[in-house]
Each structure stands twice: as C-alpha cells, then as structure tokens.
Amino acid sequence: MRTGVVIWWDAVSSGRFLTPWSAVVAVPLAVIVLAPYATVETPREFLTAQLASLIVALLLSGALFLVALAERRMSSSTARGVLVLVALVAAAVCRPFLNDMLAVGAFGLGPDPAWAERIVTNVVAWVSILSLVAVTEQLYASSRVARSRLAEALRTVTDEQLRAGRYERESRDFLAAEIATLRVALTTLLSTALDFDRVRDFSGIVRDASHRARRRAGLELADVAPEGGSAPFPGGTRVFWERLRPPAVGLVGAIFAAGSAPFALRAGGPGLAVVVIVGVIALCLVADSATRRLSRRRSRRERGIVLVAGWAVAGLLVSAIGSAIIDGHALIFFIPVVSLPGVAVIAALCAEAVHRGTVESRRLGRALRVVVRSAADRASGTRQNLVHASDVLHGRVQGTCVVLAAQVDDEVATPADIRAFEVAVGEGLSAALGTGLPSDVRPADLAETVAIWEPVLTVSSDVDAAATSAMTDALVSTRVVAVVAEGLVNAVKHAAARSATIEVRSAEDGAVLAVRVSTPGRLRVDARGPGLGVAGLGPSARVFQRGGDVVLEASVPTGAPSLAAVGQAGGALHDSDSM
C-alpha cells in the first residue's frame, strides 16, 4: 500500500497528470457511465442524456486544460498535486449540476435531485480512473527513459567488449609473434659458437620483448581499434492484447463498488448498498481469479483476450443482477457491460506498466552488468597474461642468459651446458606464451571495471589506503566490484547526468568496507524498494534518494570467514542480478 500511494502521489504531483490520454478516457467515461440517466425512458432520451453529458465533458475538459497548463509551470510538487486534486474534485462536484442545467433546461429531460450520490460517484470515478491513467502513462514514460538509457549504455559497453575481445586476440597474436621471433633468435644463437657478446645480444632481444609486452599490458582499450557489432536489445513492439496484465487483486472491484454504492443507497437504502458493495467485490474477485487461471500457459496475446472477455462476462452478470434487484430503465443496466471491463483494462494497462518497467530494466541491467564484467575480465585477463609473459622473459629467460653469459665469459660452454640452456630458455618461452600460466588469474579489479564504464559515465573514485590494501584480497575486490557495478547500472537507470562518484572507506577496525555509489538524479517512481540486483548484494545494501543524488550503499566484510558467515559472497558472486 505504501509503495502504491507513493507511485500515485508521484503521478499526481508530477506536473503531467492531465494529458491528452486523460481526455481520451474521461470523455467516454462521462458520456457512457456518468450521464444523467435518472429519468430516461426511451432510447431517444438515453442518447439525449449522453449528448448533454458530452457537451458538459467538453466544457470541463477546456477548464482542466488550463489546469494542465498551470501544473506544468509550477515548481512545487506539493502545490501541483493539490492543484490537480482540487481541480478534479471541483469538476466532479460541478458536473451533476451542469448536466442537469443542460439536460433539463435545453433538452427537456427530468431533473435528478440525488446530488450527493451523483457527486460521490463523479469524484470516485474521475479521481480513480484518471489516477490510473496518469500512473500508467508516467510509468510507461519512466520505463521508456530508463530503457533508452540502459540500451544506450549497453551499446556503448558492447563496443568496449568488442575492443576487449580484439585486444585479447591481438595480444595473443603479439605474444605468439614475439615468442616465435625469440625462438628463431635462439636457434640462430645456438647455431654459432657461444660467447659473451652473442649471449648478451640475445638477452637484449629478450629484454626488449619483455618491455614491449609490459607496454602492451598498459594499453588503454580506447587505443584499440573498434570492431563492428551490435548490442543485444530485448523487447519489441507489442499489440494491445499483449499490454494487458491482470490488475492488482481487488482494485477493479473496489473502484466499481465505490462508484455503484451511492446509487444502491438511493435505490434501496443502506442494506442494498452493503449488498451491492459486497456482491460487486465478490464477483470481481471471482472474475480476477478466473481470468488468471484461464490465462495460464497461454501466450501474452491470448492472456489479454482472456482478460477482456472475462471482465466483459463479469459486466454482463452485474447488469443482469442489477436489473433484477433494482427498478430502472433496461438501457441503464447495460452500462456495466462497458464500464466494468473498461476499468479492468485501464487497471490492467497500469499493472503492465509497473511490470514492464521492472522486467525490462532488470533484463537490460543484467545484460549491462554481464557485458561490463565480460569486457573487464577479458581486458584484465589479457593484461595479466602480458605482465606474466613480461615477468617470465625478464626474470626467468634473462636470468638463464645471464648465467650462461657469465659461464662462457670464463670458459667454453660444454654441449651439456648448451643443451641445458636451450631447454631452460625453451621452457621459459613456452611459459611466457601461456603454457604453465598461473591458475589464480584474478578477475577484473575496481580500476579495470571503472575503465570499461568511462565511455558511459564520468566516474570519480575515492578509495582510502586501508580499503586499497583490503582489496588486494581477490574475494573482497570482487565483492566491491559487484557493488560498484550495481551502483553504476542504477546511475544509468535513474539519472540523466552522466556522472557518478565511488567511495570506498574502511571501518576503524578494518573489518568492513563501506562502499557508496552516488549520481545526480531521481529514483524512478516504481523503484521504491530493493530490486533483485541490490538484494543480491546482501542485507546491508540499499538504494535511496539523498538530496539531488541517487545513492547505493553496501557493506563488504574484509575477511573470508565473515563473508561465508553472512552468506553475502554467494549473492554477489553467483547471482546474475547482482553483478
């Protein structure tokens, strides 16, 4: 309920509550459902009442258009919300009187003195239905914005992933070419009489190759030529039926019962009003349950058709029961056939807007995290391979050359010495190429991850010395990277600004790192709770609004036993929604 109220108030105070879609829904609502039907007896009078209601609805739409202009110019969200609600209630209160003035004075229909009931029905109908329309429209708009931002970021980091892939392939080819050159140089060296100068020259060739590998390890991905490719982009165009999702249980029944109760109260007193309220809610609960059951294992299009058909049947039942227990013109009792499924469709679109925004953001966010992690890990792995090759050439192979050079400087090398030198250098070159590479290759660290994000966001990092030391532990580093990755995805979703700030602080006792990612922006109205990605970071993780910034906070234990004890490592390392 709290989340629903927050979403509703954000829509009411958004500055775009009244839109063309409001008129598209409000005018048919006024003409079909809220016309002055009390004294109609013939089809002609029925249509006349609807005409009078149409004219009044158009007049009120003109007045509300001025309110729409005003709400877009007001800076205070509270003032906008109050203006919209006051205007809606005022229009709902005035409407029955205007209807009667026109229907009775201009068209000669009989008056309907049930002012209180009509006012209550108008207030309930206009506020509830137009609120659903506004919430739906706002959620679709925020979903489109978040989807667009995430998709753009995904395309950008996919380019980085392609660069990382090319960097990996070219570095592999680079090492293969360097090692092949060194093998040729070794063969050439061994084919001649060994002396100090020749061994020293070969050692220099090895040293130069080591330096080239080290320089290539520091190459920025931006300096790697991009390759063609496209980002995966989930989703697509959907037809109307696919946009319908079962509404919140009880919502349709509550709205329809609230609108029907005043007329039941006038027709049969409190007893009938209670019967109508209970009966309508019960029937709507049955309709909701039936449509959900019948929709199982069906396509989205079929589920939409089932939903509309089920609520249309419910409308027919309400009409049939109403005509049996309440006296009135038969035409009036066909109104629920239109109004009940109409309310259900609007509520279903609203439910779909909430669901679609959540699912698409989660799907694109997951894809974004996976691509960033893949690109960072590939780039990091390539750099580690190059550094490993440089270290092997500089230490192991050059060390072997130094030993042989010192030996041949004093005496002639024996065939056994030469063979041992050949084997040792050959094994070193194989190790530099990748054979015998250490199995503890670390995943990408914070710096590598931030580098992948830099084409998407301007990221500034503030990591204290104790935190830097703690992140030399691979598990702690991976956990911090998981928090930062989730925070940067949130930055893309919730912020138009392309900047983010990362803070990593160590507690005084060094047992925990406090990780915070903040970015200028505003939380989406349907993001008032931890998503799967944030929840996967552990119980300490939370996303909140702080002034003009969206902030993700989480605590990372620095000891492996603590990580295992609280079960956070599994969430960060294995849940695809948290990386």
Image: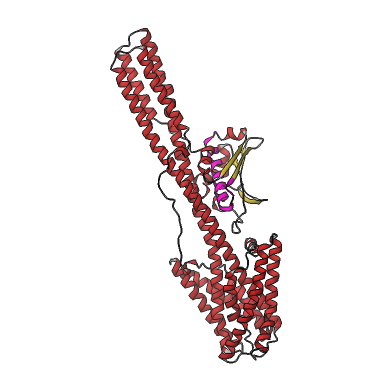
Q: How many numbered circles does the render carry?
A: 0
- The residue drawn where x is 58% and y is 88% is 46
Q: At which x and y percent is residue 188?
A: 30, 20
Spot the residue most to the left. 191
Q: Does the magenta-highlighted stretch encompass residue 491?
A: yes
* Majority secondary structure in the magenta region: helix
Residue 277 can be seen in this image = no
> Where is residue 565 drawn, in percent x and y?
57, 42
> Residue at point 46% right, 32% down?
217
Which of the pair 220/474 is nearer the observer? Answer: 220
Q: Is residue 286 above or below residue 557?
A: below
Examine the image and state in which quarter residue 21 appears.
bottom right
- Vertical order, 11 against 281 (above or below): above
Residue 453 on image: x %, y %:
52, 43
First to last magenta residue range: 472-499
Query: Is 473 a magenta residue?
Result: yes
Residue depicted at x 36% and y 34%: 173
Please provide percent x and percent y for residue 181.
Answer: 34, 26
- Depth check: give the residue in front, 447 or 400: 447
- In the displayed structure, does residue 473 sit left or right of residue 394? right
Vertically, is 72 above or below 188? Answer: below
What residue occupies the far top of the structure in this picture? 410
Q: How is the image coloured?
A: secondary structure
Which of the image's four quarters has the N terminus?
bottom right
The answer to whether one can see residue 247 in this image is: yes
Residue 236's place in the image compared with 284, above or below, is above
